[in-house]
Amino acid sequence: MRYVADAGQMKEIDKRTSQELGIPPLVLMEKAAERIAGCAAFMLGGGRMPDGVEIYGNPVIETAKDTLSVHECMVNGVPGGNNLLAGKRVLAVYGAGGNGGDAIAAARLLKLRGALVHLLAADKGQAASLTAQELLIAGQCGLEGYIFPESEKTGNTLDFSAYDIILDGIFGIGLSREVAGEYRILIERINASGVPVLSIDIPSGIDAGSGECLGVAVAATCTVTFGEYKVGQLLYPGAAYCGKIFLADAGFVPELNRRVLAEGKYRYLIYEPWEILRLLPKRVPHSNKGSYGKVLIYAGSANVSGAAYLAARAAYQCGVGLVKLLSPQECVDVVRRMLPEALYGVVSGSEDYEFFLREVSWADIVLAGPGIGTGFDASKNLEKLISAAGEQKKPLVLDADALNLLSAEADTACDADEGMHGRIVWLANKLPEYTVLTPHPKELSRLIGLSVGNITQHFIDTAKQCIYNNKLIYVLKDARTIVACGNEIYINCSGCDGMATGGSGDVLAGIIAGLGAGEEILLASRAGVFLHGLSGERAQARYGERSMLAGDLLEGMRDCLTGI
């Protein structure tokens, strides 16, 4: 697990690195410039990836070596020596802030390595002191400069497509306003050039705290970032604009970084791909089926059996000792043929409370919702199951129709004037602590009374609203699923577009329940969405994204867990 920074946290790290540790800002800028120049040389085919840079290990963002021309060569010990960059044309576009200084300094280093470099100011405004200092140094080193759009008006129109790479240093992580005017035109010119772009810290036009595109943004080939990954680089649409992400050592001190991030009101987390190995419940030789937990699943209905099967089998494949499915007889008859390993209990209409007390007492964790429908009997049974799980303090996972039934109840129970906050408080009061809710945007919209557009556009802010002052666990499903609880927001970066198919959510619910039988429920939720995404990537590699079915995730999951 590692922390991720939002814009405010990264600014605090920058400030305290200088104030508390005494590292001058110009030293940090020069160090960053070295890394930028090295990454640019790498992209130009002029050397290996420089030391102090890691290529983001996200399976969605493939290793740069898969797509970029790489020459494993060194000249005088420097990645991308002079003769390797000779004739390469570089355009460094800079703004007035710190990112502009980074771009200017990197451009100077690339010129010293033999590239033909031009500077282009995004406007003619006053540059910050460090950026102005770098601009002065660059001029003394003979770099030619232009100002946009003044260069256009004087007839010195730049042909952006004539360059081999463009460095994007227009805006940094502090941008919060919509990009407009000449800035918008400039970014559109960069995007239309067809030239590979290396963005510095984050593509200009992307909100570093949310991933939102602020009107228009640079579509980067690669992004080199410093200190820590940024929230806006991992959430869509920002993630799509970043391209490959290079995390570079620019002189920040990891201990200070962690301290600052741990002090924040919210902590943003990601997992590395290899961490799944230690997140899964351990197996031991001296054990039996009772050693690995029991999962109770209330799922399925007379005409819907697939959801129950997918959830039950996913739970079993996590290594659970026993899975029991509660469902109407019609569903049990279908699923039993597909999954004979499971136990079964028949739900006939609205069962009494004692029935659910007995069933819940047998289990270590309870999952309810996939395919149960939204009728009267399902509503009454869900109410009793939630009460039984709360009374016996058993972890509870609510998915699909369970969420829709809660939404309908909230429509009646909540005062419309209280809005979203009132519904969130009602859920927190109704459900046992650490209940897991797994809505996709449409289900969440019904649950908390916020439009789908608002949810998807402000995904991270919606997560913060959901967890405000309560102890529920929200698994907010999207292309980047978020697991939010307390003051911690986990951003899951595994997965693929082949998973956008009916039934994928049922598999996820089963995985979370299966892991929750042997692990603390919050950890199981995070590990569950991670494993779910990895399973999707394996399945997509085998079947392709267009032909994938939710059931293929189960085979992908087997591939992931083989040998673990």
Image (cartoon, rainbow, N blue to C red):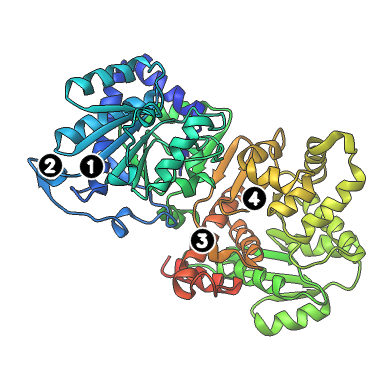
* Nearer-the-camera pick, 342 or 551: 551
Query: Could you say whether the residue bearing mark 4 is in a helix, strand or loop?
Result: strand
In this figure, which residue is indicated by the disc labeled 4?
Answer: 475
383 sits left or right of 282 in the view: right
Marked residue nearer the N-terminal end (1 or 2): 2
Marked residue nearer the N-terminal end (3 or 4): 4
Marked residue nearer the N-terminal end (1 or 3): 1
Q: Position of residue 14 (x, y in %)?
A: 40, 23
Is 256 located above or below residue 315 in the figure?
above
Marked residue nearer the N-terminal end (1 or 4): 1
Q: Position of residue 186 (x, y in %)?
A: 43, 36
On the question of residue 470 being in view, the answer is: yes
Whole-angstrom CA distance, mark 3 to mark 2, is: 38 Å
Whole-angstrom CA distance, mark 3 to mark 4, is: 17 Å
Q: Position of residue 104 (x, y in %)?
A: 29, 28
* Nearer-the-camera pick, 269 or 113: 113
Whole-angstrom CA distance, mark 1 to mark 3, is: 35 Å
Estimate how packed mark 1 is, as few (under 14), some (14 to 19) or many (20 or more) residues with alpha carbons within 10 Å.
Answer: some
In this figure, which residue is indicated by the disc labeled 3?
Answer: 496
Eye-nearest disc, 1 or 4: 1
* Nearer-the-camera pick, 427 or 144: 144
The three-letter code of the residue at mark 4 reads: Val
In this figure, which residue is indicated by the disc labeled 2?
Answer: 81
In this figure, which residue is indicated by the disc labeled 1?
Answer: 89
The three-letter code of the residue at mark 3 reads: Cys
